[in-house]
Amino acid sequence: MPPSVTRWLFLSLLLLLPACLQAQAQRPNIVLIYADDLGYGDVSSYGAIAIKTPNIDRLAREGLRFTDAHASAATCTPSRYSLLTGEYAWRKKGTGVLPGDASLIIEPGRTTLASMLQKAGYQTGVVGKWHLGL
């Protein structure tokens, strides 16, 4: 390549670098809705007609829709434990359905979905009942 073309290519890439870095720094929002007894067709963005769910529909319309999902357990505590830790609940004793006053089952300092997202620069939060002990 002639030096003038190489210089032009280098300068072009140098000018694009800030835009590429800015685009890379913008992370998508992640909203995880985890509900008991909610089926695939229970929200209108996935086909429900009896119940309207406009806010969930907007999330689905403006984000990514997932159409194939699986749970690691059929009950609340074990499936939530698995989602948050990445470990099958049946591999750890005491992760069956817990009573309301149960002890904490995710030990402090354990890597979780939230801690991984925090390390990636996300701010995390939770709303609702997670049924994983006090």
Image (spheres, rainbow, N blue to C red):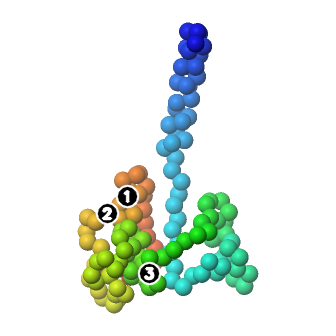
The spot of residue 79 in percent (x, y) is 42, 78
Q: Nearer the viewer, mark 3 or mark 1?
A: 3
Of the residues under marks 2 and 3, which one precedes in the sequence? Answer: 3
| Quadrant the N terminus occupies | top right
Residue 129 visible (yes or no): no
The 10 Å Cα crowd at callout 3, few under 14, some 14 to 19, many 20 or more, is: some
| Quadrant the C terminus occupies | bottom left
Q: Residue 77 appears in which quarter of the rendering?
A: bottom left
Q: Residue at x 41, y 57 (%)?
A: 117
Residue 99 as seen in the image, left or right of residue 47: left
**How many numbered discs?**
3
Calculate the distance from the C-alpha at mark 2 to the C-alpha at mark 3: 20 Å
Of the residues under marks 3 and 1, which one precedes in the sequence? Answer: 3
Q: Which mark is residue 116?
A: 1
Q: Which mark is residue 73?
A: 3
Kind of residue at badge 1? Met
Say if 97 sits above or below 104 in the image: below
Residue 16 as seen in the image, left or right of residue 133: right
SS category of the residue bearing label 3: loop
The 10 Å Cα crowd at callout 1, few under 14, some 14 to 19, many 20 or more, is: few
Marks 1/2 in contact by CB < 8 Å: the verdict is: yes
SS category of the residue bearing label 2: loop
Of the residues under marks 1 and 2, which one precedes in the sequence? Answer: 2
